[in-house]
Amino acid sequence: MKSSHPYSLPKLITFFFAFFSLSYFLYSLQFLYSAHSSSSSCDTSHIDNSDHHHQAQAQAQALSPPPTPTALHHIVFGIASSAKLWHHRKDYLKIWWQPDRMRGVVWLDEPPPRRDAAGGQDDSTLLPPVKISSDTSGFRYKNPKGDHSAVRISRVVSETFRLLDGEEVRWLVMGDDDTVFVAENLVRVLSKYDHNQYYYIGSWSESHLQNIYFSYNMGYGGGGFAISYALARALERMQDRCLRRYPGLYGSDDRVQACMAELGVPLTREPGFHQFDVYGNVFGLLAAHPITPLISLHHLDVIEPIFPEKTQFQALQRLRTPLELDSAALIQQSICYDRTRSWTVSVSWGYAVQVYRGIHLPRDVETPSRTFLHWYKRSDPAGFTFNTRPLSKNPCEKPFVYFLSDAVHDAGTNATVSEYVQHGLPSPDCKWKIADPSRIRRVEVHKKPDPHLWDKAPRRNCCMVLPTKKKSTMEVNVGECREDENVELR
């Protein structure tokens, strides 16, 4: 039976669908319009705020002077020593300390013994002032192999910080009394970092086992480490509490690192800090120095003198002239070839030159030869934290070595001229049909100083063997590599 109602069910459904569609369409138009208006208002507000921000920033920059580069006077040294060793070790400080330019303190366990000064010279003006460390007998020390003095030495950071009294300081640098710093290179390295941030900068040991026993996260104190002012302030506030939590640790530097771990600060490694946990002759290390500024040398009473037939003090004094002429390039290696005579030449500027018979590839020449033993007095290559190569038993493969004898500045060419004199001779039993380098008695190296060497990406300097008529002499030029220049043998 059909309904008599004027609106049937299908018509009602169609009507409601059309009504809701129209309503949704009108609502959508209204929403889009209001969203556009709101967005325009927000964009305008953002632009206005951004303009105000940039204007304020520009005004602040105009009012405050630009930050000055880090300089030597921004660094304060804390040197750990003892009354027993100070009389001998202070001679190492005289090699690198600059009283008129440097700030720092030497910390002793007790006043040094008085010595008869009759006829002697007062050297106190040549050295940092001496302070006596605070009593640390209240701190427990439980390591059976170490010494309680490690607690005292670990507090050198805090005790030095407390002396600053608001002076303009950016970095605190810790070192031992048998550490020699290359201060100019230290400044170059620290200039890369913001002293207002938390930075703990140093390097680990050359001995793999030492790093396993202690930590690869630790800056070794003998090689020296740097702590930014902001971090030193944070460390000073908590160090004594921290030290009480680590009575079983061995040394001072691992106690400092333990506190750094509590502060959440990792070691920033700079390989130019040299702990020198090695024995014997470090020639192989210095003649193939990594491509990084030389910052420090340590364990100078343990290793052999770096120049032959000299005391260690005399040997280190010899480095002072090239250091003054071109500190950035000190002991940096360059590699080139004398193709006419089939020789490989390695220059460790300001230190030594090596001449090899035959063509040796750079990958091999840049690898330190094992002239030394690691800290456990073995020559095991697995005991080092870097690649090494063995000394060759083939007499033809042994290099002819020339050590620095003098260096001067040539005002006419604005270059340095350094002279290297032959030391000893390899075995004469070589049967190779290659020119004999023993006829070369001296090597003359020409180089223009480049104080901005480390402002650029790290790269070895290039060198070139020059023609010369000087008898028994090889002349070499060292300098920044030209475009497309490399050590490729063609």
Image (cartoon, grey):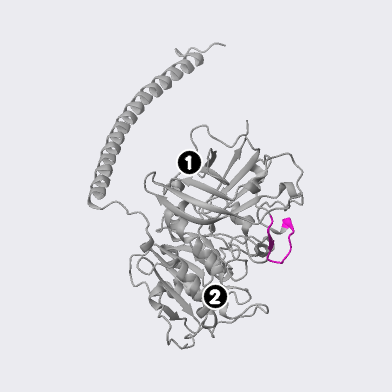
- Residue 425: quadrant of the picture: bottom right
* Whether residue 244 can be seen here: no
Which mark lies nearer to you, 1 or 2? Answer: 1
How crowded is the residue under tag 2: few (<14 C-alpha within 10 Å), some, or many (20+)?
Answer: many
Q: Nearer the viewer, residue 383 or 52?
A: 383
Cα–Cα span, label 1 and label 2: 48 Å
Question: Would you place residue 177 above or below residue 268 in this image?
Answer: below
Q: Position of residue 450 (x, y in %)?
A: 43, 47
How crowded is the residue under tag 1: few (<14 C-alpha within 10 Å), some, or many (20+)?
Answer: some
Quadrant of the frame with the N terminus? top right
Q: Position of residue 310 (x, y in %)?
A: 57, 67
Mark found first going from the N terminus, 1 or 2: 2
At x 56%, y 36%, the residue is 486
66 left or right, relative to 304: left
Where disc 1 sits, the SS reads loop
Q: Which residues are magenta?
A: 370-382
Question: Would you place residue 44 above or below residue 377 in this image?
Answer: above
Q: Position of residue 39 (x, y in %)?
A: 32, 32
Q: Nearer the viewer, residue 275 or 476?
A: 476
108 left or right, relative to 57: right
Magenta stretch holds residue 52: no
Amino acid under label 2? Leu
* Whether residue 376 can be seen here: yes
Magenta stretch holds residue 372: yes
Q: Nearer the viewer, residue 340 or 148?
A: 340
Tag 2 residue:
243
Is the magenta region chiefly helix, strand or loop? loop
Tag 1 residue:
480
